[in-house]
Amino acid sequence: MQRNLPAGPRPKDVYFFATCLVDLFCPEAGMDAIQLLEREGITVHFPENQTCCGQPAYTSGYADEARAVAKVQLDLFPENWPVVVPSGSCGGMMRHHYPKLFAEDPMLKAKAENLAERVFELSEFLLKVLNVKWKDSGKPTKVTLHTSCSARREMGTHLHARELLAQLDGVEVLQQSHESECCGFGGTFSVRQPAISGAMASDKADALKETGADAFLSADGGCLMNINGTLEKRRDSFRGQHLASFLWERTGGNKGEKA
């Protein structure tokens, strides 16, 4: 999880890799993430030809197919700017697994390693690179966190999220009993093993709600879809929100003003 931070002055430009789930299912979270960056004086560049990071194929054992998808992404970020990703699982794929995918091709491996060194999950970038210091502008609330398995283990996203939330005086973060357990989404796992996935999602939803929190937060779109879908089927009003949207609202963006 530890990595070298960019040397030199604070970055002025970044690329934004939205992820396919954010793009298709929660674009507002992507826009809120961009606004958080812009408010810090960062110019955000969005390569329009970006697609999936290749993780679904990779974790299903289809290395060739994952390689074909990942190869397209390698040339989207030519400038030596950080690449900010609003998902720890997608960020983990690009940082840790792209170099493995291209290990047999020296030229593509070099490109993959260069990109991997520049990839940051959003909360990590805000905390460790931009060193944000925020004041809370919201009413007192209680939240609990869910972090995807790969985001937790490969990117330490849960730690970065906790540090950012600790800056917000009106936010109390409650610990859930199943914090380190999978929600059952797992990309194609939820399709291949729906009964097992559904049981895992149900356990996770129970654990989150039992904290007594007003809502749960996650930085991974797939987990949000899975858990919120489970709650919706139950007709339960308890819901989750993307971490980027919560942070934007709590730090002055809730009135719709754009940075």
Image (cartoon, grey):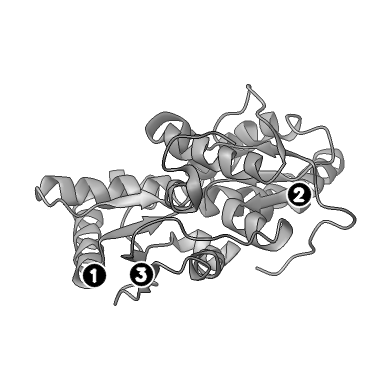
Percent x, y of residue 166: 50, 71
Instruction: Give the mark nearer the N terminus: 3 vs 1.
Output: 3
Residue at which label 3 appears: 181
User: Image height check: is 250 above or below 48?
Assistant: below
Which residue extends farthest left? 235
Q: Secondary structure at mark 2?
A: helix
Would you identify the image quadrant in which residue 259 lies?
top right
Residue at x 18% of width, y 53% of height: 195
Q: Secondary structure at mark 1?
A: helix
Does residue 66 appear to the left or right of 100 in the view shown?
A: left
Instruction: Give the mark nearer the N terminus: 2 vs 1.
Output: 2
Q: Nearer the viewer, residue 33 or 53?
A: 33
Q: Are marks 3 and 1 in contact (CB under 8 Å)?
A: yes
Q: Nearer the viewer, residue 78 or 63?
A: 78
| Image quarter of the N terminus | bottom right
Residue at x 82% of width, y 47% of height: 114
Residue at which label 1 appears: 207
Rate crowding at label 3 as few (under 14), some (14 to 19) or many (20 or more) other CA atoms within 10 Å: some
Q: Nearer the viewer, residue 257 or 179?
A: 257
Instruction: Give the mark nearer the N terminus: 2 vs 3.
Output: 2
Residue at which label 2 appears: 118
User: Image height check: is 48 above or below 245?
Assistant: above
Please name the amino acid that badge 1 sits on: Ala
Q: What's the CA distance linking mark 2 and mark 1?
A: 35 Å
Percent x, y of residue 35: 57, 38
Does residue 199 appear to the left or right of 132 in the view shown?
A: left
Please name the amino acid that badge 3 sits on: Glu
Closest to the camera, between mark 3 and mark 1, is: 1
